[in-house]
Amino acid sequence: MEEVIDRIMKIYQQNEFHFDADSIMDFNNVKDRIIYIVVNRHKNKEMLNEVPNRVLVEDIAVVYKIMLDDAKDGSTASIQIKNSMMDIWSVDEETLWTCAQENNKRLKKPECRSMYEVLLELMIQRHGIVNDELIDGIRTAEPRMYILRDESGQYGASVIADMEFMYRVYDDIGEFYILPSSLHEVIAIPVRDEYEVAEMTSMVAEVNRTQLTEEEILADMVYKFDGKSIKVA
């Protein structure tokens, strides 16, 4: 028990952050730190009754957090914004949405990277030099896939609520499917006639069931961005 307590204390000390709890009572003190993330609507029904939110598409909702100090391990602490906090601030959900749209771009910085680029980077990190044959195999693999997330890697699937970012991705790769791989990122696949939506949906459900915790699951269905809005594929 002493060893367990000692380990817990070390983890706490390494990740300790400080903030003035009274400061969050003043909206002007937090408005530049308000961000949004996306969550599954059906798995979070009770929470959504207590927090400001908006429906993004079908079973995905936007909720809001206050970012606090960055921890020493690179993670970020945050506070969930609740309806009671909005009452104290005398603001509505639309105000939170306006603030968060600007803050997400500045604090979370969305990015689109090809699966080829991500896999190549991982292999070089793990194995050093990678042979040309393997590189060519990854580069030419189909379907073409892209990782949509933010630089932090935490709750990065929120980038799909940034329409300016989604338009930029559309300009680069055209109409695309969205596979919600977790709360932290989604996969974009350019629309092609030969791609079966049912097969992709089955793959998403399988990953959710076998690779993610219940809290990490974003959705079990596949979506499509047609250059105007996100819809169920």
Image: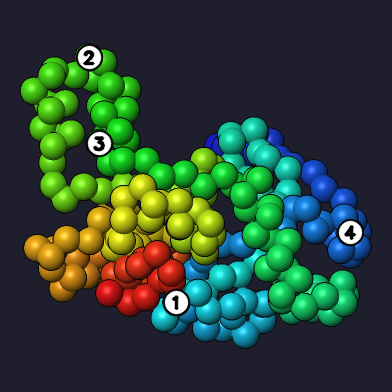
- Judged by depth in the image, the label closer to the viewer, 2 or 1, is 1
Distance (Cα) linking label 3 and label 4: 43 Å
Residue at 71 percent across and 75 percent down: it is 94
Q: Position of residue 223 (x, y in %)?
A: 32, 70
Does residue 70 show up? Answer: yes
Q: Amino acid at mark 2?
A: Ile
Mark 3 or mark 4: which comes first in sequence?
Answer: 4
Q: Amino acid at mark 4?
A: Asn
- The image quarter containing residue 204 is bottom left
Which residue position holds label 3? Answer: 116
Which residue position holds label 4? Answer: 28
Mark 1 or mark 3: which comes first in sequence?
Answer: 1
Mark 4 or mark 1: which comes first in sequence?
Answer: 4
Which residue position holds label 1? Answer: 57
Mark 2 or mark 1: which comes first in sequence?
Answer: 1
Q: Position of residue 65 (x, y in %)?
A: 67, 61
Relative placement, left or right, of 89 versus 117 is right
Q: Position of residue 107 (x, y in %)?
A: 65, 45
Determine which of the numbered discs, if any, sits on residue 129 in the image: 2
Distance (Cα) linking label 1 and label 3: 29 Å
Q: Amino acid at mark 1?
A: Val
**Number of residues whose C-alpha sits closer than 10 Å to that of mark 1, classed few (under 14), some (14–19) or many (20 or more):** some
Q: Helix, strand or loop at disc 3?
A: helix
Looking at the image, residue 203 lies above or below residue 111: below
Residue at 66 percent across and 45 percent down: it is 106
